[in-house]
Image (spheres, rainbow, N blue to C red):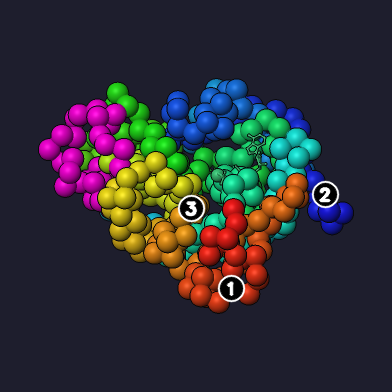
Amino acid sequence: MSDDITRVIGATPDPTPPGPVLPVPAAAHDDITTVVTPVAAEPLRRNRAGGSPAPDGVPPVAVQPAPQDVFSSPAPLATLEARGITAWFGDHQVLDRVSLTMPAGQVTALIGPSGCGKSTFLRILNRMHELVPSASLAGEVLLDGDDIYDPARRLTDARKDIGMVFQKPNPFPAMSIYDNVVAGLKLTGVRASRDEKDYLVERSLTSAGLWKEVKDRLRAPGGGLSGGQQQRLCIARSLAIKPKVLLMDEPCSALDPTSTRVIEETMGELQHEVTIVIVTHNMQQAQRVSQQCAFFLASQGQPGHIVEHGDTEAMFDSPIDPRTYDYVNGRFG
Ligand SMILES: Nc1ncnc2c1ncn2[C@@H]1O[C@H](COP(=O)(O)OP(=O)(O)OP(=O)(O)O)[C@@H](O)[C@H]1O
Ligand SMILES: [Mg+2]
């Protein structure tokens, strides 16, 4: 660990339930599913954190009637900025001072060999890292300048503003397509009328590129869709709570080429309404979908760091670091 980094300590268990990690039902993501049960998790506390945790039994977000524009207008585009992110699992340091700006309205691709910390970094961006009991971190994550780890901010706000889509599509299988889309509303404390829900379901499914395929069977179970459709359903579910940022961890790696193409097209449409950060091992995909790119690397037992980042075209056509050149040209990793 570097001397100039103030280590964050996982200290007092927080009585506040960690809030909605709604897109993660069982079998969603191996290393996450073990930690999403709200009461079982022990959220990490930053050493500068204080705040006043909610007393036991208090829901994480007060339920209030939502004004109509909550449903009709898109959230304003936002820039996400990571500053000096260092992360540990126990004593194992897995990221070293990672700083990256993910600009509003653009797609940023995170690339790099297996184990270099891409998923860990992504989970830090929406406060899921802290759900692992041994996890700790240092650094800051700013959403339009506001620190998402600010103790005055609710965990649920970060998760509402910054949605996540995982590698394996993880709809609630027995729940209807309709109910899958609106599942996040309750968890984030938004009450909606039937008309508002109808509007939201159509809008979210349209944005996710799935509406036409499912509009006649909204009451059918989500588990009955194809893998690619399920992934778009998960995207719709994330969009329904109007995030400012959508994080996607290898969202196409379990999909066939046709479904992959549809998701990529969907991302192209979505970036006008939400800032996107995608982890991918597919170099062609990174080139196709992203405008910004960051190359992560963890050399020989060292924590992961960013070797190079910037404009995607430049990263692939004229990388500055020879390791980037080798990686994007498939010479290692
Ligand atoms: N829950 C966990 N507990 C302990 N160590 C973990 C946990 N999750 C990840 N790690 C470790 O953190 C390091 C970074 O893992 P991470 O999953 O972030 O890498 P990655 O770049 O996403 O890899 P891949 O491309 O294979 O998905 C690895 O050494 C991994 O073993
Ligand atoms: Mg990963």
Q: Amino acid at mark 3?
A: Thr
- Classify 303 as above or below 190: below
The residue to which callout 1 is attached is 319
Label annotation for residue 1: 2
**Crowd tier of the residue under label 2, counting other residues whose Cα lies within 10 Å: few below 14, some 14–19, many 20 or above:** some
- Mark 1 / mark 3, whichever is N-terminal: 3
In the image, the residue with mark 2 has its CB under 8 Å from the nearest atom of ligand 1:
no
Q: Is residue 186 magenta?
A: no
Query: From which residue to which does the magenta span run?
Result: 199-228
The Cα atoms of the two marked residues, 2 and 1, are separated by 29 Å
What is the residue that sits farthest to the front in this orientation? Answer: 331
Q: Is residue 304 left or right of residue 61?
A: right
Label 1 within 8 A of ligand 1 by Cβ? no
Secondary structure under the numbered disc 1 in the rendered image: loop
Alpha carbon separation for disc pair 3 and 2:
28 Å
Question: Is 56 on the left or on the right of 187, as rendered?
Answer: right
* Coordinates of residue 9 in the picture (x, y in percent): 77, 39
On residue 280, the disc is 3
Which numbered disc, 3 or 2, marks the residue that appears first in the sequence? 2
The number of callouts visible is 3
